[in-house]
Image (cartoon, rainbow, N blue to C red):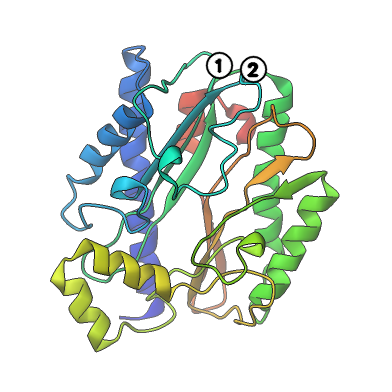
Amino acid sequence: MVRDQKIEICKKTRAYAQECLVKVMKKVLAKDLTPSEIEIRDMWLSELRKNNAILPDGWYSPPPNGIGVLIGTDNDREASRLNYKSMRPEEIWPRDDVRLNTKNGIIYAYASPVDRETGIIGDFGVTLYFGKKKEIINHLVLCYGIVRQVFEYVESGMTFSQIAEYMKVLIGSLGLNNEIEARTSPAPADDVGHTIPFIMENITEEETVTLASGNQNKINKMISEKRIFVRAGEEQIVKKGMAFTIEPRPKVIGNPKIPMVSLHSICAFRENGKKELLTNFNQLFDLAGMSYMK
């Protein structure tokens, strides 16, 4: 299988995660529901599991099932649920006592589906805001602009370290910081993305056996350890036929009332050198009334 075909699997898997979340949010909005984080996770998981081409759970676990759902409102004193450093700790897992308000609520939803045949992941994550506060809207637009600006900057032949440094300087110049805790990264504070395993490199015989076993824990560990991080000091070169995530989580320095924003995107380099930014956000932006993001 050539690398462009593998990129298509990543795109298809990610798009499916987005399509499933669209179905969930349409139900929520049509019935004027106020679902909890756990209820949204379970609805999303139920939709995802209808596709036998992907594994039953996502690879990024914990949180349970490889799905993160965090909810707040624009009245939160410190937007505490959304200002997380990692979704790994149990206190950040989806809860049944935190509910979505579709008048002024904010939600971050993330899923990490895995293609069953190849082990290629299609991670998808988006921050949606249902309110009208200008300072939050401005921050959302700014964060999306950062993702796009980094994508425009990236070129084949660059090192991951160069990309991480560019993003760090850009975020700092805008009065923001990027507090990330990636427990499997050698330099978590500088981690702003990672490769999509098994696109650039071929899966080994041992990894094929692990994938075929269907053992979710072993598969999750294999995928996690296979990633190369976009971070300071990483000399991995951007190559044709490679895909990696762009996932800064900028916060406004000195203003914890404005929530951290994550718009998890993927930069894919085709074998002919053409690059593509995978976002899949527009349908969800429409549902949330976020036309300003388009």
Name which residue type carries label 1. Answer: Asn
Task: Give the vertical position of 201 relative to 28 (above or below).
Answer: below
Pointer 2: what residue?
A: 132
Answer with left or right where residue 180 lies relative to residue 115: right
Cα distance, mark 1 to mark 2? 7 Å
Is the C terminus in the top left, top right, bottom left or bottom right quadrant?
A: top right
Image quadrant holding the N terminus, namely: bottom left
Q: Tell me where residue 43 appears, x and y as whole percent.
A: 26, 32
- Image coordinates of residue 139 in percent, x first then y, are 71, 34
* Mark 1 crowd level (few <14, some 14–19, many ≥20, 10 Å Cα): some
Which of the two labelled residues, at mark 1 and mark 2, occupies the earlier sequence position?
Answer: 1
Is 134 left, or right, of 127 in this rendering? Answer: right
What's the residue type where badge 2 is placed? Answer: Lys
Question: Residue at image x 26%, y 80%?
Answer: 207
Q: What residue is shown with label 1?
A: 104
5 to 54, vertically: above or below: below
* Residue in view at x 21 percent, y 69 percent: 117
Question: As displayed, is residue 32 above or below residue 110?
Answer: above
Residue 11 seen from this side: yes
Q: Tell me what residue is drawn at x 32 percent, y 54 percent.
A: 113
Left or right, 216 with reference to 270: left
- Hey, which quadrant is residue 218 in on the image? bottom left
**x, y percent for residue 69:** 42, 36
